[in-house]
Image (cartoon, rainbow, N blue to C red):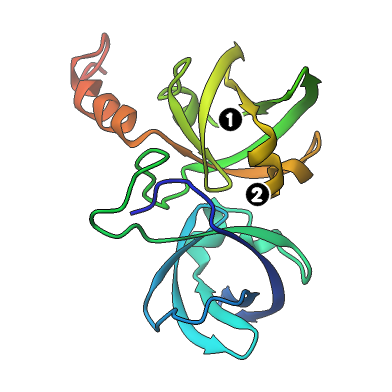
Amino acid sequence: MFTGIITAIGTIHAIDAVDGGCEFIVAESWDDVVLGESIAVDGACLTVMRIEPVGFRFHAVTTSLGRTRIGEYAVGTRVNLERAVRAGDRMGGHIVQGHVDGVGTIVSVRQVADARLLDIAVPPGVAEVSIPLGSIAVDGVSLTINALPGASMVQVSLIPFTLEQTTLGDRRPGDRVHLEGDPVGKYVRQFMQPHLPGAGTS
């Protein structure tokens, strides 16, 4: 489990296609990572399969490539990193499982005083669990939903610290981002599904 508080930015060092998936190395200087550890890479929970001289090697299977933009990574791509939360740690963000629900597209980026507003087109499943002032993870970063400016659209407001400490300051219109909806909202939606109008009818 994660909290969406990014603790490092890594860089893709190498990528290899394997058996329909891919293996890639993220360059980062953490010196106490162990084999089998879970690390969120742009919000996608991945397992460290090998410690490399420059960082860590991950394997993204074909199903992970199908629901993320990991297949779009190139050598030099910067990625947000977060290690799994320890029991007893402060939870500065919200519950983030590292299970990417889909990929969104940045529609607009604009500066309003000291805040940078990003409007993001999101898949229907993410839109259904998004509410104003609710939580969403964007490339693994825990954010508060500022507004819902349109159908299947989420707006987030980024503070200067977030722009400096994550890759979200690099984002421009047309860029694709990993999205994870609030897990609480997803559970509520699942529990309520049988009771919604039209449920169970042919």
Q: Is residue 135 above or below residue 179?
A: above
Whichever of labels 2 and 1 marks the residue nearer the N terminus, that label is: 1
Q: Which residue in the structure is indicated by mark 2?
A: 165
Left or right placement of residue 76 versus residue 181 in this view: right
Q: Position of residue 42 (x, y in %)?
A: 57, 54
Q: Residues within 10 Å of mark 1 (few under 14, many from 20)?
A: many
Left or right placement of residue 39 versus residue 42 in this view: left
Q: Quadrant of residue 125?
A: top left
Q: Position of residue 26 (x, y in %)?
A: 63, 74
Q: Residue furthest top?
A: 197
The residue that appears at 39% across and 45% down in the rendered structure is 96
Rendered image: mark on residue 196 = none
Work out whether residue 116 can be spotted: yes
Q: Position of residue 119 (x, y in %)?
A: 68, 24
Q: Position of residue 110 (x, y in %)?
A: 80, 23
The residue that appears at 52% across and 23% down in the rendered structure is 145
| Element type at mark 1 | loop
Q: Is residue 139 above or below residue 106?
A: below
Q: Residue furthest bottom?
A: 53
Work out whether residue 150 can be spotted: no
| Element type at mark 2 | helix
Q: Looking at the figure, which quarter contains the N terminus?
A: bottom left
Q: Which residue in the structure is indicated by mark 1?
A: 122
Q: Residues within 10 Å of mark 2 (few under 14, many from 20)?
A: some
What amino acid is at disc 1? Val
User: Closest to the observer: 189 or 87?
Assistant: 87
The CA span between labels 2 and 1 is: 24 Å
The residue that appears at 53% across and 42% down in the rendered structure is 102
Number of marks present in the image shown? 2
User: Closest to the observer: 19 or 60?
Assistant: 60
